[in-house]
Each structure stands twice: as structure tokens, then as C-alpha cells.
Amino acid sequence: MKVLLGWFGHETNTFSRRKTDFELLTSQDSWEGEEILDTFRGTPSYLGGMIKKADENGIGLIPTFAVENAGPTVTDKCLDYVCDILVKYAKKHLGEYQGICIGLHGAGCSETCDDIEAYTLKKLRDVVGWDMPITITLDLHGNVSQKMCDYADGLFGIKENPHIDYATSGYEAMDALIKAMKGEIKLKTEVVPMPMLVPVTVTKDYEDISNYILQYKKEHGLLDLAFFPGFPYSDTPTTCASVFVTADGSQKDHAQKIAKYIWDRRHKVVNIDSFNSKEAVDEGIKYLKENDTGIFLINEEADNPGAGTPGDGTDLIRAFFKANIKGSAFAYMYDPEVVTKAMKAGVGAKIEIELGGKIEDSNFHGEPIHLEDVLVRSISNGNFVATTPLMKGIPGSFGYTVGLQYKNVQFVVASVQNQTYDDRAFFVGNIDFKQMRLIGLKSSQHFKAFYNQYVDKIIPANPPGLSTRNLKSFEYNRVIRPIYPLDEDVTFDPCNG
């Protein structure tokens, strides 16, 4: 028996004024054919989990294409180009495989398509028909649609944030697919949408809810049961939180019960309290005065490239420059122009730059920062192997990267957009973060999987930005209203109606 294998994920921020073409989609990396197996076998990824289960069961794999990124709305041309690659493999090997297992995201949008996942699945269904089982993995920030459930037999979602369970969901998706291929189970997935938008940050109450759902899933013998907060930075009719259940046969009542359980606790799940950048840095300064040792970390969650933002927002790093604290460092800013200028000047040179604030509206991500006498400390090709538990061992690149210093602040500037997951951005910028006292980075949650073991205090900075937790700062035009917390007077009873 063989399985067609692939991965096409995009987390689309529709509030960005840019577009994602194929070059931007694949800017972090992409893989095709056999190199997928060579790269991801043994890694803590969706594909790593899928491959592991297939290997354990002696299932052959036909790898197709793999890519994932976050960013602005995908162009229709880019969407069709990727789907054409997947369809090419599906047609070429038709008759060789008995099932499809593919990693998707759940919050993908193109210029004319609100649901990239359903669109991709339909393209595959048009090739293989309705009798072949298809299972997919989804990110918990996915906006799960009914069409996804219609086109795929089984949905399997990550539950953790940071997403340290990529491989687990991939393993479960492949396990269920193999059983369905053998006729041992009849997969059925059902979703309950909830009139609720949830920022991508995690509260303690959210963690408690996740643990409750995990235990409920085990007690009732369900293949999967997941609460998805969704992705509130995609303005579409399917944007909302949801609960879905995947089982051997119809089990929608379980999803309804969990949806009610969460709805009754919605005020604990949605957290919009936060510090602005100056307040966050002031907290850091206070900590340093009160403690002779330890690292204080500030994450700029409102400009998280992992949620489709530009990564060149200037609010937090401006506060770092104003504070001018010895032993402070920031990694990283996205600004190819600054990288090019620093590379031309060379290590040891001092340059004048306009840093950041070049991509999105300045009301969201600030104006460029004019700096003089900036020291070029290092130049790198930006290549790395991830150290974060989320994707340990997987190669990546920030593109050409420079380590700079302005007065007391060391900072890294790179030419490929990404959030900071681990120490690799500091490393390629020639900064030992363990020797720093105050560090800043751009990420909402995923950095914690690495940094929790090294830093003594973490607080988020939430200035204006395209991934701010202040959802009322966005002009929603297509989300179905009323919806909490944009609207307070919202009623919802998933068990009756």
C-alpha cells in the first residue's frame, strides 16, 4: 500500500496591503519529491510524524511538494501554481496509492478564494474521486470550514501553543488514514463554528481548557477532538473559533458539548490586556535594577511574521534604542536594504541607515528609524539548523544577515521574513544571547518552546501592528457578526440550534 504525501500551508493576514506570490511563499524554503523524505524523516514536524507512522507500518510514500509560510493574501496565480504541482503528482501516480495524507494550515486565503484548504482538497478530489480516504493536519489557528470537512475524511489538529505537537498530529493523521485504507474504520469529521475571535496568545485558562479536551478525547475514544481558536487576522466569512471531532462514524454531539464548555468560559480565553513597548522596556529596566543576574525577554507580539506581519515594525526596537541599556540585544528586524548597505560597507565599518517601517502603513508598524554611526559587527549567509523543539534539526535560512550595534544595543537585521523561534537569529548575527540581560524579539508564542528554559522573565509588548491582540483596531468587513469580543451581546447554544 502507498500514500500520496504533501504539505501546503499558508496563514493569511488579509489586513496586510501586500500580496504573497510564489517567491514570497517559498522564501523560507520549499521541497519537492524525494527530498521531502530526506529532509523531514525523524523531525518533529507534520511530515516527520506522517513518515514515522508510514515507516512503522511498511507503507510506501509518494512525496509531492512541501511548503509553509505566513503572510499577506496569496495571489490566485500562486495558489493555482502550487495546486498544479500537487495535481501533477496525483495524476502521474494515480493507481499506485490508496490514500492521501497532506499537511494544510486552515487559515489560507487567495485573492478570490477564502478557503485555500478546501480549494486544494477539491483539486485532489477531482483526480481521485470520493472513495479514496484523505486525511489532513491543521494548525490550531485554522478557521475550519464545513467544506474542509466535506472534502477530507479526517481532520487532525495540533493542540499545543507553542506547537510542539506537529509530529503527533501528523502521526495520528497517517494512522487513521492507514486504518481507513484497510477498511477498519469509516472516518467522519464534523465541525461546530463558534461566534468568537481569539488572539493568538495563550492564557492560563486556555491551557486548562486544552487539558480538559485532551482528557475528554481519551475517555470517549475519539480519533481527534480539538478546539481551534482560529486566526482572527483573516477577514473572511469562516473566520472564527471552532471545535471539530474526527471519529469512526458521526460523533458531532461531542464537538457540541465542548463548544458549549468553551463558550461558557469565553471571557477567560480572550485576553486583550498587554503592555505597550515603552511600558515593557520600563518593566525590563526595573527588573535589571532589582536583579544582578538573569535575562529579561520582551516579545513583540503585534509584529509577528508568523502571523503574516512584515517583521520590520519599529515600535519595540525604538524603545530599546531610547533606553540604551548595556547588555541589550534584539533579533531580528527584516530590512533587506539595511542588509545590503551593511554588506557593502563591511565588518568594522560605521554606517547611516533608515531601519524598518518600510512595508506596511505606519499607523500599524511605525516610521523608519534614522540611525547614524551604526557599527557593522558581523555578516552571515543566514543559514542555520533549527534548535527549537518545534522543528529541531530542520535546515532554514534568514537570507543574508548582519549583526549591528547602535550605542549599547546590539541587533540583527535579515533579508528573509520569519518570526524568532530560538537562538538562531542571534547566532547568525554573532550575538550570544546568554550574555545579554535584556533581549527583544518578534513572536507571539512559539519562542517560548526554546526560551522558557533560559530566561528569567517574559512579558509581551503589544504596540499597534497586524497581529495585535487588540482586535477592535481592525476594520472587519466580512466576518459574520455578531461575534465576540467585537460585539458584547452575542448568544450561542451549540447544543440547541
Image: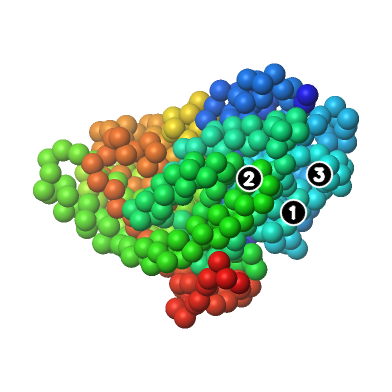
Residue 331 image offset from top left, x and y in percent: 39, 43
Residue 377 image offset from top left, x and y in percent: 37, 35
The N terminus: image quadrant:
top right
Which residue is tagged 3? 124
Q: Distance between the residues labelled 3 and 2?
A: 22 Å
Label 1 or label 3, whichever comes before in sequence order: 3
Crowding near the residue tagged with mark 3, few <14, some 14–19, many ≥20 C-alpha atoms within 10 Å: many
Depth order, front residue of 358/162: 162
Residue 121 image offset from top left, x and y in percent: 76, 48
Q: Establish if 183 lies above or below 191.
A: above
What residue appears at the point 73 percent right and 25 percent down from the top-left corner?
61
Q: In this view, does 393 lie to the left or right of 284?
A: right
The C terminus: image quadrant:
bottom right
Q: Establish if 367 lies above or below 84.
A: below
Disc ID at residue 150 = 1
Q: Which amino acid does label 1 sit on?
A: Asp
Q: How far apart are marks 1 and 2 (CA)?
A: 14 Å
Viewer-side label of 1, 2? 2
Q: How far apart are marks 1 and 3 (CA)?
A: 13 Å
Which residue is tagged 2? 247
Q: What residue type is labelled 3?
A: Leu
Viewer-side label of 3, 2? 2
Viewer-side label of 1, 3? 1
Q: What element carries label 3?
A: helix
Label 1 or label 2, whichever comes before in sequence order: 1
What residue appears at the point 62 percent right and 52 percent down from the top-left corner?
251
What residue appears at the point 46 percent right and 37 percent down from the top-left corner?
164
Q: Is mark 1 on a helix, strand or loop?
A: helix
What residue appears at the point 47 percent right and 47 percent down from the top-left corner?
216
Q: Establish if 229 lies above or below 235.
A: above
